[in-house]
Amino acid sequence: STKSIDSAVGLDEKDDGIPANKRGFASVIQENAVTKNGEPIVVDKKEGGIPPKKESTGRPKKEATAVPPEEVIRTGTIKWINFQGRYGIIVQDRQFRKLGVKSMDSFFFFNEIYPEIREFVPLHDTHLITPIVNKEQRIQFQARAHERDGKKSLRAFNIRYTKPLARRSLVTQKGEIPMLDWPAALTLIRKSKARLGNDIYNILSAPEIDEKDRLKRMHNALDHCNRKIEWMRSQVTSEDVAKGCKTKLGVEIYDMLTDIANVDNVERRADEAYFNCLSDLSQFGIKLTQNQEEDLKGWVERRSRFELRGNY
């Protein structure tokens, strides 16, 4: 009979003639699988008997956190700079003008170009800061919102070149803007050494400080002085210093020779100008010849003796 034939080949009439041993995952799930609530799982045979995917019940994925506007590295161009007033204005590139405070321009002060500058230059010496930047120069920077008299604006900081300059100081090789010219750097180096002498004097003259603590304080003062001097030297190149010292020497000699009739002891004045030039070079760590070092040392000793006698 038909029923016996069906049974012989393993057909099940209620499953549309599909062999029971080949009904596979679809038929098993359809007949046996239930949810935790006892409800059968609905299977779509057209999709190969795969149960429909349930919506994820896990924790929602975290959305990407937006970078705060003050941390974004922006680019722009120096629009205007006032060396006497010690500030300037940057025109932001178009893609940054709606980021944070909507503004085309960003204002900056010289002492905010390099964030750590207060560590190296005291507040009363900030007038010596002269950044090497020009109008229309391309730079990169960060900016924060600033409010004054109820008006919001942008204040730029951490300003750098977009491309390192050729033949410049150590800082420009890293894209940083030099903050000093060589005369200002020389002045600050001498002031730093004078400050070190004052600090050492105070340490040595304080009776309440024990010997171990005294040595520690002296080493700390020396380390701090060396860090400042190293930073000041990094702002200029040896070529700039040498050129500046020789220019200064030439001007002094020219002025002296053109008024030689009124100059007392021309030879000593010429020596003084020359050795001052060598001294300035040595302040920047520029190596002198052996003869120059010996001559400079002798001149310093002679000048010290003259000053003590009041004859210099």
Image (tube, rainbow, N blue to C red):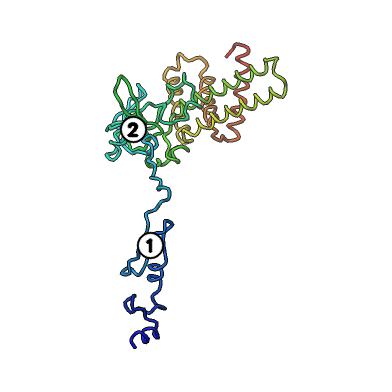
Q: Which residue is mark 1?
A: 41
Q: Residue furthest bottom?
A: 1
Considering the image in quadrants, where does the N terminus appear? bottom left
Q: Is residue 226 left or right of residue 114?
A: right
Q: Which residue is mark 2?
A: 134
Quadrant location of residue 150? top left
Asked if residue 23 is positioned above or below residue 185 in the image, the reply reads below
Quadrant location of residue 290? top right
Considering the image in quadrants, where does the C terminus appear? top right
Q: Is residue 147 left or right of residue 225?
A: left
Residue 222 % position (x, y): 61, 27
SS label for mark 1 = loop
Q: Residue furthest right?
A: 211
Residue 297 % position (x, y): 61, 27
Q: Which comes sooner in the sequence, label 2 or label 1? A: 1
Residue 96 % position (x, y): 30, 38
